[in-house]
Structure formats: structure tokens, C-alpha cells
Image (cartoon, coloured by chain):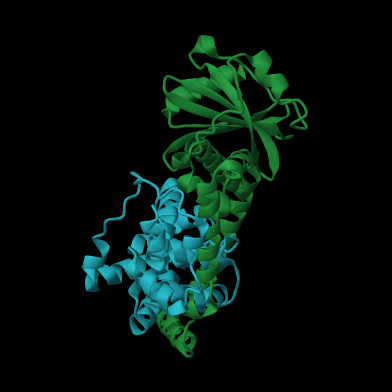
């Protein structure tokens, strides 16, 4: 890693925003780069200097009451007195309907899943930003799969899809959903595809979604849960998932 | 679950969630408008906007970034109206300029930088840098949360923070620059 690559990464590292693998890489670089060591010292000084309490502008006394008053005025205007009782009753019924709908939906799609989706996207973006796509670089599934031995408490599913036009590039460790997971890297032409996987009891069919411009497909089968994410178009990413499922 | 499910008044429920973040909201507005009176108006306007948008807020979510996003947008509306020149900035997001390498540690010290000096430096830097620094250093927001508040990609948050810090350092200890 050169200092040029390290510039924003060093900040991200010191902010505690890098994954384990990228953090280790920055630490290795820091050991012997005096330029970055002094940058780290300056980062810490600046943080201390900034966090002097008198720089923080606390809300002046009385602002909370002023705001509370304007909120209540606005709220009353929005629901005039006469119809208010009826509106409340209607809202209660509507809320009941919404709740039962959400509950039904939640059993299929927990809010947790949105969180993981966002983590998957961050993991994907980090791997591209840090230029840290792989820890083990090999297109051979019989090299990649054993590499995970002793690093994870499960054996990931590693399939080579070269013949289908999705060559395996390598694998690395990542940390998602509060646990270490396997990340496999595939490519379609110049588009990297990250496939994250870890054990899960549920079974679900592939579902396509987008997040921050990336296409993302999630499914679970044979005791594992899978997340595929790429800037590849949804159709081809769908093909990739279809081929994996075979 | 949405907020409408309880019998409490909407305004009361809204207040219970968001008034605790009044300091955060005010601090951000104060630093973006750089004026105490304008900051108060902007914060009040932000709370009214937030009340309107409250229907789309899920109470299990963290209220702080949700509110700060509205405050930030209200500040920008205010800036566009009152200080449009400040929004025409030279912030560089993608192309990183050459880095300052090897400045020695002694010369880089921000020796007892007094808060007045920092206050001035912080007000001088581009608003794009100022806002991410405030959200990170004072509000402890993660890169992901900052990306949502400021509505830019994660990589942009990373580069703006890094550039913003260097801009501040440059203003606080000019020695760093001469030692390049």
C-alpha cells in the first residue's frame, strides 16, 4: 500500500470505519511509514483540539419552549377541533390495519434484513475502495475453499462458474451481521461481484433489490444465506445467482 | 411499527423523540449558518418540517441522523437564499491533490491551539468540509449515517473528511505546509 492509497484510508482507519482486513493492512503500512505516523499524530491532535467543549454550540435557553409552542400550534392547525375525534378513531383503525399488515410482512421480511442489506453494500463498497478484493487470489475453487479452514466456523460453498462466464477471482474474510463471513469474488467482464455467505437456518427464494445504485440478490438454501452484490445489471446478476443455485 | 399506533398526541410523541436532539440540531445549524439568530430560526423551521415528515419516520430508527438530515437541508435552503456565494465552492471530491508527505511531527503540532483560532479556521473552510467534520467529530455519526444526512456516496464522505481535516490543519499550523 502506498501513501497515495492510504490518504483517505488512514482517516477511515482512525475513525474505526474499516473492516478487519483493511485495518490490518493500514496497520502494517503504519509500522514503517513515518509520513503516515506523523499524519496519525496530527489526526489525533486535531480531534482533541476540535472537541474542546466551548466550541460546541448548545441551544440557547428558551429555544426548546419556542419550538414546542410552534409545533403545537402547527399540529392543531393540521387537525381542527371538530373533526379531531373522528380522525383519531379513523387513525386508530388505519393503524391497526397497517400494524397487522406490517406484522405479516415482517414475518417474511424483517427490518433486520434491511440492516444486513446496507452492511452488504458497505462491505462491497469498502472492498472496492480499499482495493482489497481478495485475501486469497485464485480461480481454483479447491484453493479458495481450504483457505477458509480455521478462519471461519463453517465451510463456505465455493463454486467455479468460469464456464458460465463468471470466473472466480478469489476470496476474503469480512464481518457482517455481527459475525465473520466468507466473501467470494467473481467477475463478469470488468464488473466485480461480491458473494457473501454464512450459515442460516431459513430457506428463501432469491429476491432482487437495489441499494445505492448496486443490484443485490439475497437468498437462503441448504443451511446457508447468500448475498450477491454488483454494479452488474440485474438480469446478468440474476443469471449468476441462477447458475450458483444449480 | 409506525408512530400512529399509540393514543398520544402526535406533537407530544414527536417532541419526546426529537427535542432531546435540540443541541445537535442547533450546533449543526449554528456552524452552517455561522450566526446564532439565524441558527435558531433554521432549527425552528427544521422541527416544523420534521413534524410534517414524521409520518414516514419509523420509531425504532435512530432519530438523530433523521433529524440532522432535515436540519442540514433547511440550512442549505437558508444558505441558497441568503448566502448563495458560500455554496459555490471549490470542494474537490474525487481527484485528490498531491498529499503533504513527511512533515515532521514537531512542526506539525497544533500547539495549544486556542478555541478562538479553531473557531475561525472551521468557519473559513468550505461548508462541504465543515458539515462532515461537525457530524463526525461532535455528533459521532458513522460514515454511513453521514452519507445519508449529506446525501452523498460513502466514498465522498471519506474523501471530504480527509480533505477537510487537512484544510483545517493547514490553517491551524502553517508550518506543516512550508515543510512539504
* Quadrant position of residue A205: top right
Q: Percent position (x, y) of residue A58?
A: 49, 81
Image spot of residue B119 (x, y percent): 41, 75
Q: Is residue A45 left or right of residue A177?
A: left
For chain A, the rendered hue is green
In the image, residue A131 sits, relative to residue B16, either above or below, namely: above
Q: Is residue A140 above or below residue A109?
A: above
- Measuring from the top left, give residue A89's x and y in whole percent: 54, 72
| In the foreground, B94 or A41 | A41
- Residue at image point 53% right, 22% down: A186
Residue B62 visible in the shown view: yes
Residue at left 47%, top 82%? A59
Quarter of the image where the N terminus of chain B is located? bottom right
Residue at 44%, 83% (x, y): give it: A67
Q: Which chain is cyan?
A: B
Residue farthest bottom in this picture: A62
Asked if residue B55 shows in the view, the reply is no
Looking at this view, is B46 or B180 the one in front?
B180
Q: Residue at x 66, y 45 (%)?
A: A107
Amino acid at each position: 500500500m502506498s501513501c497515495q492509497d492510504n490518504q483517505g484510508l488512514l482517516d477511515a482507519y482512525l475513525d474505526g470505519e474499516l473492516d478487519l482486513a483493511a485495518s490490518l493492512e493500514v496497520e502494517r503500512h503504519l509500522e514503517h511509514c513515518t509520513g503516515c505516523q506523523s499524519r496519525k499524530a496530527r489526526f489525533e491532535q486535531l480531534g482533541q483540539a476540535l472537541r474542546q467543549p466551548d466550541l460546541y454550540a448548545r441551544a440557547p435557553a428558551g429555544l426548546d419552549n419556542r419550538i414546542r409552542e410552534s409545533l403545537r400550534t402547527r399540529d392543531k392547525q393540521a387537525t381542527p377541533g371538530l373533526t379531531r375525534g373522528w380522525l383519531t378513531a379513523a387513525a386508530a383503525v388505519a393503524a391497526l390495519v397497517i400494524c397487522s399488515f406490517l406484522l405479516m410482512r415482517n414475518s417474511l421480511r424483517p427490518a433486520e434484513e434491511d440492516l444486513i442489506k446496507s452492511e452488504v453494500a458497505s462491505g462491497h463498497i469498502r472492498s472496492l475502495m480499499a482495493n482489497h478484493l481478495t485475501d486469497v487470489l485464485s480461480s481454483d475453487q479447491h484453493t479458495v475453499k481450504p483457505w477458509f479452514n480455521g478462519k471461519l466456523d463453517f465451510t463456505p460453498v465455493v463454486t467455479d462458474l468460469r464456464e458460465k462466464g463468471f470466473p472466480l477471482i478469489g476470496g476474503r474474510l469480512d464481518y457482517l451481521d455481527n459475525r465473520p463471513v466468507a466473501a467470494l469474488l467473481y467477475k463478469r467482464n470488468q464488473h466485480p461481484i461480491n458473494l457473501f455467505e454464512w450459515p442460516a437456518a431459513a430457506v428463501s427464494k432469491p429476491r432482487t433489490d437495489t441499494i445505492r445504485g448496486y443490484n443485490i440478490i439475497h437468498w437462503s438454501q441448504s443451511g446457508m444465506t447468500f448475498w450477491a452484490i454488483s454494479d452488474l445489471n440485474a438480469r446478468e446478476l440474476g443469471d449468476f445467482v441462477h447458475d450458483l443455485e444449480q | 411499527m409506525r408512530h400512529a399506533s399509540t393514543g398520544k398526541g402526535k406533537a407530544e410523541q414527536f417532541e419526546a423523540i426529537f427535542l432531546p436532539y435540540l443541541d445537535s440540531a442547533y450546533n449543526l445549524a449554528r456552524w452552517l449558518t455561522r450566526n446564532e439568530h439565524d441558527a435558531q430560526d433554521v432549527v425552528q423551521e427544521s422541527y416544523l418540517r420534521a413534524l410534517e415528515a414524521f409520518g414516514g419516520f419509523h420509531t425504532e430508527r435512530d432519530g438523530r441522523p433523521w433529524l440532522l438530515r432535515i436540519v442540514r437541508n433547511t440550512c442549505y435552503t437558508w444558505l441558497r437564499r441568503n448566502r448563495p456565494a458560500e455554496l459555490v465552492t471549490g470542494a474537490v471530491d474525487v481527484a485528490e491533490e498531491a498529499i503533504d508527505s513527511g512533515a515532521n511531527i514537531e512542526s506539525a503540532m497544533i500547539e495549544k491551539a486556542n478555541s478562538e483560532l479553531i473557531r475561525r479556521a472551521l468557519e473559513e473552510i468550505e461548508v462541504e468540509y465543515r458539515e462532515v467534520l461537525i457530524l463526525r467529530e461532535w455528533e459521532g455519526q458513522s460514515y454511513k449515517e453521514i452519507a445519508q444526512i449529506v446525501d452523498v456516496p460513502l466514498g465522498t464522505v471519506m474523501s471530504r473528511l480527509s480533505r477537510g481535516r487537512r484544510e483545517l490543519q493547514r490553517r491551524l499550523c502553517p508550518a506543516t505546509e512550508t515543510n512539504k
